[in-house]
Amino acid sequence: MGGRGFGIRTMYDEIKPGVDPLGPDNKLVFVTGVIGGTTAQGFSRYIAMSKSPSTGCVGRAVGGGKFGAQIKLAGYDFLLVEGASDRPVYILINEKGVTFLDAGPLWGLDTQETQRRISEIHGPASQTACIGPAGEKLVRFATITHGRRTAARCGMGTVMGSKKLKAITIQAKGKVIPANPGAFKEAVEKQVSILKTHPRRVQLTEYGTTMLVEVADKLGCHPTRNFQAGRMEGIERLFPEEFSRNKVKNFGCYGCMTRCGQIHQIDEGHYKGAYSEGPEYETIWAFGGQVGNNDLGAIVAADSLCDHLGIDTISTGNAIGFAFELFEKGIISRKEADGLDLKWGNTETILTLVERIGRREGFGELLGEGVKRAAERIGRGADRYAMHAKGLELPAYEPRSIKGYGLSYATSNIGGSHMYGRPRQELYGTSDPRPVDRFADEGKGDIIALVQKNQAAEEVAIVCTFGNSGLSPTLLGDLLAAGSGYEEFRDPAYLATVGERIICLERCFNVREGFDRTDDTLPQRMFTEPLLNAGAATGQMIRKMDPLLDEYYQAFGYNERGVPTLQRLEQLGLMSFVNLPKV
């Protein structure tokens, strides 16, 4: 259909097995949704996909702002970047076509100054996605940044850096015309009327994702001090009302009235003047609970610094928490950490490490490799404290408290991502298709398969998970059918099949790269250490991973090794081009 579907099909066809993610043979795809660039609310995001420098498997990062719409308005459904330049360049896309321009004067600049300079050259109407110093220095989890919105996970900015590609700038004057304008307008008007009064939309506009701090605290699933506990002392200082006191205004992406972006500025204290278009819940956690810090100003400052350097806040905070625990356990010394005081909550050290990671300086060079590689280099049992799945650092939901999330992290084809499949049945107590006990050790493999398929189907349209309030399958089908002209999109079963094809093809890509059941796992801590200080979740562990994996594989039609069967590939219509190693 488009979006993530175009992305993985292109990756499977174009990227040969075994290529170095940072070598010239790796390729980078920017994909848009089926109805991006239209008036539909929350549908104009983009996805960057490549073989990930963090994991060596499928990489996927979703970005907001206006860049996705610009790709569509320029007349493209996706962009494919291949090869590598021997000098820094940036790409200009306009009505004249595609031009490669010298980026030498931009190399070394942060993401905000890069965009400002390009805007001076090509005009304020141009829209740019770029990398910062972290991408240039090949930090494994560098972002692609547009405005202050980031396509953050899996190191897609690192791939740009390896190609010496500083930025892509688009000057678009086109217009996206729906296949059935009348029906499309009617569907959009219905969507807008729902969003106007929908409680979730209202709450997101008011608080953004800061409200999830309180939700996670109540569930005992806010990972604290590198996933040792599920709640942090003093976390009430990071509740949404506290952020509201520092809120300047809202920010919204192209074609979205939700405007969930919360711009904050600190007016007093040690971090007075700190300003960011965020932080989102994940970032609040990354520089809050993960590192034992409840200073709101320091979190805003760290978020802003990550945006300028172009690094993923989740992986950065995870890496710092990893270092803090290694110091706590006596595995690394202060001398090894450039003399820094690696004590929980030390905000000066946190900000210093963000800077050093983003520029790959000193101890930051090691942490910039990600926790998996850093642990391998350190040795001495450091791997026990590296919180990742397939090499991608875990995000802000404790797997022992939300065990469906644990299974989704483990089986995700991109590694430890909270956005590969969200088990709302456990997070929010929804009952579709049935209620699920979040502490149960069995009986949820099919649910996680379902939510992953649904997420994949949504990402062919790339509808925002925060802009989709009240979006029923029927309304989604109406928007897609009227926008594209393909009536098949009205059928939820068809969309589910498309979602499963995407998941299955991503799995096939990983199998070609040597991944199997042994890689569908979680950090050792989740299986051996009872969760601390987590309310009702205190004492929980992942006790039956194998039965959960068996349930999940059965739901997808994989064999016991987690590899798609030939029968299932044929049922999904993938046999004509999938070529798996003999299993």
Image (cartoon, rainbow, N blue to C red):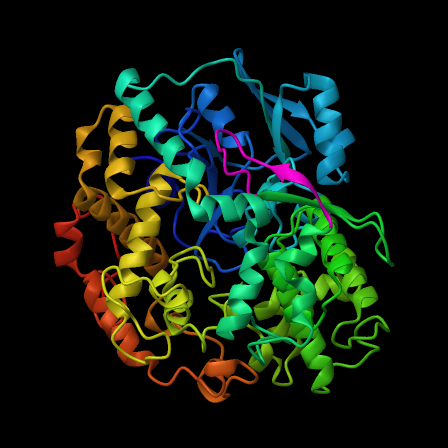
**Residue 270 place in picture, x, y as percent:** 87, 59
Taking depth in this image into account, of 18 and 67 the one nearest to the observer is: 67
- Asked if the stretch drawn in magenta spans residue 255, the answer is yes
Q: Is residue 43 visible?
A: yes
Q: Which residues are magenta?
A: 246-260
- Asked if the stretch drawn in magenta spans residue 392, the answer is no
Q: Does residue 507 lie above or below 522 as drawn?
A: above
**Residue 572 place in picture, x, y as percent:** 17, 49
Q: Does residue 553 lie above or below 69 as drawn?
A: below
In the image, what residue occupies the spot 32% across and 19% down? 178
Q: Does residue 252 lie above or below 496 as drawn?
A: above
Q: Does residue 439 lie above or below 203 as drawn?
A: below
Quarter of the image where the C terminus is located: bottom left
Location of residue 171 by image quarter: top right
Q: Most prominent secondary structure in the magenta stretch?
A: loop
**Residue 29 place in picture, x, y as percent:** 46, 38
Quarter of the image where the N terminus is located: top left
In the image, what residue occupies the spot 39% across and 74% down? 403
Q: Is residue 369 visible?
A: no
Location of residue 302 by image quarter: bottom right
In the image, what residue occupies the spot 71% across and 39% down? 111
Taking depth in this image into account, of 219 and 147 the one nearest to the observer is: 219
**Residue 130 place in picture, x, y as percent:** 64, 36
Classify residue 454 as left or right of residue 541: left
